[in-house]
Image (cartoon, rainbow, N blue to C red):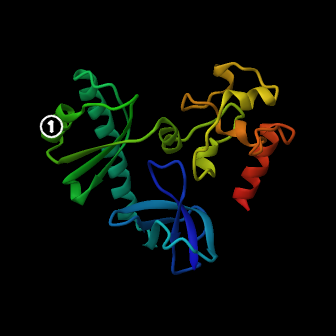
Amino acid sequence: MLIVQVEIPGRARSITCRVESRAFEIGDRCVVDTGGRRVVGTVSRVPLDLPWEQGKPPGRVIRPARRRDDEGAAHAEAKASRLVERAQKIADELKVPLKILRSEVRNDGNRVVLIFVADGRVDFRELVRRLAREFKARVELRQVGVRDGAMLQGGMGHCGRELCCSKFLTSFRPVSMKMAKVQGLPVNPARISGRCGRLMCCLRYEIDESGKFTGAGCRGSCREKRAESEE
């Protein structure tokens, strides 16, 4: 199967897409179908013919982007940003304890999906009613965990590199303070916590299944894992 990696606005991690042509180069703009929703993205890895044993990739490249596609994408991104800002302001007015990360406008503007993080469960029924009146659309609020929120937003870690979760991690495995201790790292939450506020995922890179330290530190293993993901 011919596949390509495409960067999508609002997502820190590129998505894998089926593609019919090898003509795409890194930096090319293209129109992608992500399951009923069409967006404009940027090719981040050239097409490769690779086996795919996990069903179908999450996206499909329809065609190269045209000028009007890019203009429409810019308008949609600006609108999504305004929706997040307005929705957060209304949530603050209603004292609903959540942080809205991004928005997606679907069905020609008749449906708005807002993705947020919060501590525990939140009663947002009044917020949904208020937003529906404000946006004149069906509003859906979707909660994600703080680690997923960091993955969606992206950013830089203490090491100065892009966050592992937004670069190559496919799942979040448990991390404990004990893992920092066995590596001789300072048990200081401010120094071993990631952008999400939880212990850094890389703390377990040099820990085997029995909990023993196996290498020269999380930084070395992190470099190896990044190299593997970029091959």
Q: Position of residue 155 (x, y in %)?
A: 58, 38
Q: Position of residue 5 (x, y in %)?
A: 57, 64
Answer with the quarter of the image where residue 71 lies.
Answer: bottom left
Q: Residue at horizontal 64%, vertical 21%?
A: 189
* In front of the other: 168 or 209: 209
Residue extending farthest to the front is 210
Evaluate whether residue 85 shows in this view. yes
* In front of the other: 184 or 39: 184
Q: Position of residue 19 (x, y in %)?
A: 51, 76
Is the C terminus in the top left, top right, bottom left or bottom right quadrant? bottom right
Is the N terminus in the top left, top right, bottom left or bottom right quadrant? bottom right
Q: Residue at horizontal 73%, vertical 32%?
A: 179
- The relative height of residue 18 versus residue 107 in the rendered view (above or below) is below
Q: Residue at horizontal 82%, vertical 42%?
A: 220
- The relative height of residue 168 versus residue 59 in the rendered view (above or below) is above
Indicate left or right for 108 with 98 as reference. left
**Residue beneath disc 1:** 129
